[in-house]
Image: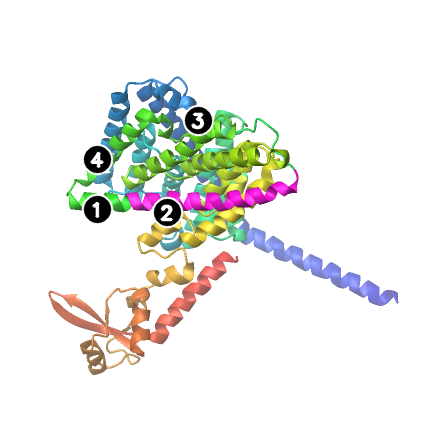
Amino acid sequence: MSKPHDHSLSAQFSRGISEMKDSWRVLLHRGPSQFRFWFIALLIGVSAGFAALLFRKGISALQAWVYGAEDVNYLHSFAADLPWYWLVLIATLGGLIVGIILDRFTPDGRVRSVADVIEGAALNEGRLEMKAGLASALASFLTLSTGGSSGREGPVVHLAGVISSWVSDKIRADGITGRDLLGCAVAAAVSASFNAPIAGALFALEVVLRHFAVHAFAPIVIASVAGTVINRLAYGDVTEFSMQTPGALQFYVELPAFLMLGVICGLVAVVLMRAIFFADHVGDVVHQGLRIPRWLRPAISGLLLGVIAIWYPHIIGVGYETTELALTGGLVLSQALIFVVVKTAAVAITMGGRMGGGVFSPSLMIGALTGLAFGLIATSVLPDVSGTHTLYAFAGMGAVAAAVLGAPISTTLIVFELTGDWQIGLAVMVAVSISTALASRLVDRSFFLTQLERRNIHCAAGPQAYLLALLRSDAVMRPLGDPRCASREECEALHSQGLSLENGASLEAALPVFDRADAVFLPVVEVNDGAEVLLGAVYHVDALKAYNRALVAVAAEEHS
């Protein structure tokens, strides 16, 4: 009986030795390049961390100089004592300078943001526009320093993406590597902004790369930790917010209230997003109807923001002072409700006016105010079974932000890491899950993906939708004269019926034509000096094969 057992042990030992040899060969051949890649990820993490730190400190320094604030964490308190005309002048001049910068250095006068980072990851091998990206960072910096009502995290994420794009170009990275490096930069930027390494890593995977591939996890975590270290060297290991009272639920009977809060926060998030899109549409109509120079559009928005700030200086900048008041219960119900409305309008004016900044911090502020208002009502109606109203503020902060960003996992973790209080987890998770589920049905999944959808970029539906826009007809065209291509007469016959493709047309445009015409092939034509030249034909089967190969490549990347 011992011989089979010995034979089994011997076989296991031999397999173990063989696996060790295979592992050693992998380490010798792939290890050095993998380590070099992680080292690059570390450098990008450090660079993005310093970019986030300098961006934040630069805004604080300029705000302190412009508004005369001794502590920019309490900016609106200082601004409230300034002459009204100074508030209007600061915001208007800031908008004017922003408009001139964007008009000169961007082709469309539009600030680049997180939506463009998502587009770069999906459609451009992890690359972003360099000149327009740097101009957008400067525009956002000035917007946030001179009265704009937006957030700093979005611009920092895009600026970090510009850094990774430069590195990718220098090392001639392929698409997978470029996307991974972009994820590293985003993770470090978010981590450095919030002192939240876990949330930073997951935000890059959940929002930007939109997959959780194992090969991307290690370098992104390395970069995220690097960004956090940069933040802690400057500010210490402290949380942005803290609960002043215990955050425990008063029995599980209180959970239905957080379900209701999730519904309300989801609707508030949708109102915020649609208000921004409506303001952008109104801005376009006014801009085109009155033929206003595009560089003047941000100045007009700045003027409107300055007028609002006369009565409500709380809208200026990131708004962390007001968020802190909401989270500590320092506001009454009427104040919380009014500030929700005013801040939503101010954010819509800022973004619709083509000024700079992001939506992360505003959504945190609006969420905290919404949660506080709901909590004040809930705890007064059922005081015997209710916890503290500030717990609702924390849950609301996460619920609105998660719905706007379309990032329930990373936003939940950001709330935990911003507060350092993991005991509020149950309430936050319930509210976040409901708000995200509701809002994603009323918009295209998130604010960023809806922005892209409005530009006719279909990232919300996944790679099966946007990959067709990347594949060009000339890549699968059979040239005229090729034995596998139809004859000139057959091509001309279809072209005369209006069934043809322009040279370079995407398969997104080609496949619907195939479906309508039920054609085996479509001729490809090019216009030269007003004359149409027949180049070849695209066959339906070739287009489908190319589409299938692209889907397989994406699936392989996401599951590697």
Q: Residues within 10 Å of mark 1 (few under 14, many from 20)?
A: few
3 vs 4, front mark: 3
Which residue is drawn at the image coordinates 22% and 38% (left, top)?
297
Judging depth in this view, the residue of 307 and 543 nearest the camera is 307
Which residue is drawn at the image coordinates 70% and 61% (left, top)?
15
Which residue is drawn at the image coordinates 33% and 70% (left, top)?
511
Q: Are discs 1 and 2 less than 8 Å apart at CB?
A: no
4 vs 1, front mark: 1
Q: Which residue is mark 1?
A: 285
Gap between marks 4 and 1, in whole Å? 20 Å
For marks 1 and 3 on the same chain, the one whose residue lies earlier in the sequence? 1
Q: Which residue is mark 3?
A: 321
Residue 267 is covered by the magenta coloring: yes
Coordinates of residue 366 in the picture (x, y in percent): 43, 36
Residue 202 visible here: no
For marks 1 and 2 on the same chain, the one whose residue lies earlier in the sequence? 2
Amino acid type assigned to the residue bearing label 1 in the image: Val
For marks 4 and 2 on the same chain, the one whose residue lies earlier in the sequence? 4
Disc 3 secondary structure class: helix
Q: Which residue is mark 2?
A: 115
Coordinates of residue 443 in the picture (x, y in percent): 40, 52
Coordinates of residue 427 in the picture (x, y in percent): 58, 41
Q: Are discs 2 and 3 less than 8 Å apart at CB?
A: no
Amino acid type assigned to the residue bearing label 3 in the image: Glu
Range of magenta residues: 251-279
Q: Which mark is residue 297?
A: none
